[in-house]
Image: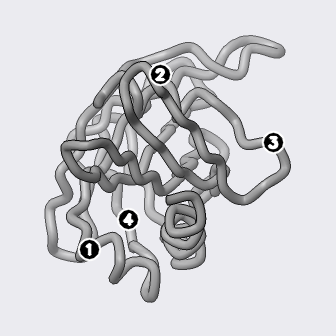
Amino acid sequence: MRWILLCILVLAGCGSRTVVLRDDWRGTLAVHTTAHEVYRDQFAIVEVRPVVVTSDQGAAFAVLTNVRRRDANEPRIVRMTSGDTLLRYTRHDRLRTHCIDGCQKAEVGAIHLSRKAFVIAASTGLPLRIWGQRGRYGGVVPAHAFADALSRLADVR
């Protein structure tokens, strides 16, 4: 499942607010939104995208994260919270990305959510606080992004 989430994170949406990926070999269906920038300053950029991956074994709900730094340091995420709640975050990789004039260093991963939390976030959004060794970042994953993923999932099933 990690490999699938990482592949989805790397792939970009093509004009639509949601992207549907079927993998007949693995028997999965993944629905995710295009990236939403939730934080930017002179040193860092944070992009997120809600995702649902379904298979015969059930469904997994997450928010894929891409935290990039534009200085000499790479991001090293320690934890992620929403209010006082510690979120279950898994780092997938640390990459050099967006190499145009030099490369930005990124940490990509996933915040794992329950179905109930994902559905609630479709109404309220998900406030995020990202705690890193080289900075703290905040933002809100917009409610419409969760709602778009759930709506598209219902359409393709």
In percent of width and height, residue 137 lies at 44, 55
What's the residue at 16%, 74% (across, down)?
A: 84
Q: Amino acid at mark 4?
A: Leu
In percent of width and height, residue 103 lies at 67, 14
- Answer few, some or many: residues within 10 Å of disc 2's Cα (few below 14, many 20 plus, some between 14 and 19): few
**Residue named by callout 4:** 128
Comparing labels 2 and 1, the label whose residue is closer to the camera: 1
Q: Is 59 left or right of 145, judged from the image as shown?
A: left
N-terminal of the pair, mark 2 or mark 4, is: 2
- How many numbered marks, from 0 up? 4
Question: What is the image's colouring?
Answer: one colour
| Residue 73, numbered circle | 2
Does the CB distance between marks 3 and 2 fall below 8 Å?
Answer: no
What's the residue at 34%, 42% (across, down)?
A: 110
Query: In 3D space, how far apart are the residues under numbered discs 3 and 4 (Cα atoms)?
Result: 26 Å
N-terminal of the pair, mark 3 or mark 2, is: 3
> The residue tagged with tag 2: helix, strand or loop?
loop
In percent of width and height, residue 15 lies at 84, 50
Comparing labels 3 and 2, the label whose residue is closer to the camera: 3
Q: Amino acid at mark 2?
A: Asn
Q: Amino acid at mark 1?
A: Ala
N-terminal of the pair, mark 3 or mark 1, is: 3
Does the CB distance between marks 3 and 1 fall below 8 Å?
Answer: no
**Residue named by callout 3:** 14
Query: In 3D space, how far apart are the residues under numbered discs 3 and 1 (Cα atoms)?
Result: 27 Å
Query: In 3D space, how far apart are the residues under numbered discs 2 and 4 (Cα atoms)?
Result: 22 Å
> The residue tagged with tag 3: helix, strand or loop?
loop
N-terminal of the pair, mark 1 or mark 4, is: 1
N-terminal of the pair, mark 2 or mark 1, is: 2
